[in-house]
Image (spheres, helix red, strand yellow):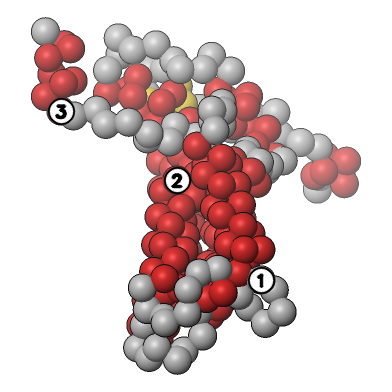
Amino acid sequence: MSTPDTDDAPNPWVGTGLLDADMGPSSALAHLYRGEIHRMKLWRERLDRTTNWAVLLLAALLTWAFSNETNPHYVLLVGNLAVGLFLSIEARRYRAYDSWRSRVRSLQQNVWAPGLDPTRGLEDERWRERLAEDFAHPTLKITTEEAVAHRLRRVYLPLFALLNGAWVLRITAFTDVAWPTSASVGGISGVVVTTLVAALMFVAVVVSLRPRTWHASDEIRKEALRRDRESDRH
């Protein structure tokens, strides 16, 4: 019978052979990769779900605002707050999505790519150490500001532009009251309301388009058409 000390002692051979040079990826590593792909896919679906909610809300607001001339225009401004809430939720989900995708990309770059093409070198010589540390202590890889900027560039900046462009159209072409009176909300003058809307749009544009070093894991930000890649090889 083994003593408690023997039972509790760590096995120094745990993990041996996960990726031997002469045998390639083991089944354990393949299952690990498949699991990370599945987790990444679930978070990608959660991102799409939030975007769908924002688009449906925007469509409902535009339909209601232009269905009757007596409907108040400030409902579109309230829509900015709702879409902004969806943006904050999606940015938080994107940070989690990126943490799982970073693991998938590490395996793709350092296991599958060299396995398919032995002439390729490793993208990161310390990839095992970094991946092991990430499994031991999972962390978010990007800041909230970068996540917000990414979702603005991809989805929400056009939504805000459409919503506020419709608001400008609503207070100018679909009312008998001249601007800036037509933009007033209660006791707040139209000039103040218009200034606030313009300032918020300016902040959104600056956050989404300002130059920065992106830390999101291998995000595709430019086209690499197949014919261009083929021409580069020749």
Residue receiving disc 1: 189
Q: Where residue 54 sits in the image (x, y, percent)?
A: 46, 69
Assess whether mark 2 and mark 3 are in contact (beta carbons under 8 angstroms): no
**Label disc, if present, on residue 6 of the rendered structure:** none
Q: Is residue 133 left or right of residue 3?
A: left
Q: Is residue 225 left or right of residue 56?
A: left
Closer-to-camera residue (175/42): 175
Assess whether mark 3 and mark 1 are in contact (beta carbons under 8 angstroms): no
Please name the amino acid that badge 1 sits on: Ser
Disc 1 vs disc 3: which is toward the camera?
1
Q: Is residue 152 left or right of residue 114?
A: right
Residue receiving disc 2: 153
Tell me the distance, in whole angstroms, between the alpha carbons under discs 2 and 1: 31 Å
Residue at 47% across, 60% down: 160
Q: Earlier in the sequence, mark 3 or mark 2?
A: 2
Please name the amino acid that badge 2 sits on: Arg
Q: Is residue 9 left or right of residue 33?
A: right
Residue receiving disc 3: 226
Q: Where residue 172 sits in the image (x, y, percent)?
A: 41, 71
Residue at 52% across, 44% down: 205
Q: Earlier in the sequence, mark 2 or mark 1?
A: 2
Is 209 drawn above or below residue 43 in the view shown? Answer: above
Please name the amino acid that badge 3 sits on: Arg
Tell me the distance, in whole angstroms, between the alpha carbons under discs 1 and 3: 55 Å
Q: Secondary structure at mark 3?
A: helix
Is 32 drawn above or below residue 231 in the view shown? Answer: below
Quadrant of the frame with the C terminus: top left
